[in-house]
Amino acid sequence: MSTDISSEESFLPLPDGRTLAYAEAGNLSSKTVVLYMHGFFTVGDASQTSHVLLSKNVHFITPTLPGWGNTSPPPPSTPYRDCLTSDMTALLSHLYPDSNGRDIKLYLAGGSLGTAPAQILYGAPYDKFPFGRCILGMLLLGAFSPFRYHKDYAKHMTWTQYILPGPIGHSIPFNLLSHLMKFVLARKLSTIEGAEASLRETVFDVMDQAEREEFAKWSEERGMVPDDTVRKMAKNVMKSISKSWAGFILTPPLLHSDWGFRPDALDEEHSRPPILLTASKDDDMSPVAYAHYLAANYKNTRIKDVDGGHMSILYHMDEVWAEFLADEPEQ
């Protein structure tokens, strides 16, 4: 019998003096864990957890990534991948103090930007992330490929992406373009109205009529009108940069960095957990080509294509969760 519990944001003091923020929902004592990594300009938020996850009696945990919201940035001398594996080991050890990294069933998931840290955990050495031995699967929603190894990554970018996280921004020293862009965006995102306007400009105004109708239907099924959904997202945008812009500044270096492994060179044990990739056919932020690169380079993958743009996977999440967790019985 599941215990449907949704918590407010929680805070874990870390050994290095930093803080990790996270949210959780579902059965908080379940040994079946879904660890979800959020995307750009948002935070870990468990307030609208899918009924599929609740019916499967899982413990849904969504940490706020380093440098976003109330989670401290990585220490200056620590690679992102080492900060992430250390933080997630600390979080799971805190929530499961008697597990010894052995007796939980761990499902990794990530959306958009969050697909990079999800992959880092998937391929991490077990001495860095002991809970890696517990992984039973990984779900990547609108995935990013590792730019370090995906030589054709830039061919599928919009001009905006090509300039900032792409080759141009990467070639300019000191991540200078990200710092300049921060000043442009900081003015736009300083008010809830500005954050809403930015979301509409980049995500919602580019939807075609069919996707607008899907978005409206999805919102209404959750007791909201589309404007409510946009405002809720805008609040998370503002929360994500309320303490610092470190998460934003770190994004291009993260996408180009060494994630600790090559997807096509993972050993058999790391490659055993299956990977479900979902890709929106008209997504220009996380192009379908990235998912196809990952499918060709990881050993145990399948792709689920959906119609629509960057937001469209949201409308299919119940069926995606059901497919991803098909081996978990309903309670």
Image: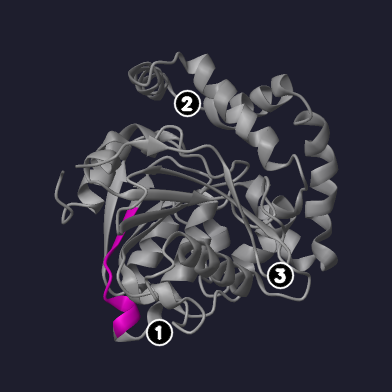
Judging from the image, what secondary structure is the residue with disc 2 in?
A: loop
Local crowd size for mark 3, using a 10 Å CA cut-off: few (<14), some (14–19), many (≥20):
few
Q: Is 94 left, or right, of 322 in this rendering?
A: right
Q: Is 174 left, or right, of 137 in this rendering?
A: right
Residue carrying label 2: 207
Residue under the point 67% across and 70% down: 15
Query: Is residue 272 part of the magenta span, yes or no?
Result: yes
* CA gap, disc 3 and disc 1: 32 Å
Q: Which residues are magenta?
A: 269-277
Among numbered discs 2 and 3, the one appearing first in the sequence:
3
User: Quadrant of residue 317 in the image?
Assistant: top left
Residue 265: assigned label: 1
Local crowd size for mark 1, using a 10 Å CA cut-off: few (<14), some (14–19), many (≥20):
few
Tell me, yes or no, whether the two marked residues, 2 and 3, touch with CB atoms within 8 Å.
Answer: no
In percent of width and height, residue 303 lies at: 28, 55
Disc nearest the viewer among 2 and 3: 3
Residue under the point 63% across and 68% down: 256
Which amino acid lies under the numbered mark 1 shown in the image of this protein? Answer: Ala
Which amino acid lies under the numbered mark 2 shown in the image of this protein? Answer: Met
Disc nearest the viewer among 1 and 2: 1
* CA gap, disc 2 and disc 3: 44 Å
In percent of width and height, residue 210 lies at: 36, 21
Residue under the point 28% across and 45% down: 321
Residue carrying label 3: 16
Judging from the image, what secondary structure is the residue with disc 1 in?
A: helix
In percent of width and height, residue 73 lies at: 72, 59
Q: Is residue 206 visible?
A: yes
Disc nearest the viewer among 3 and 1: 3
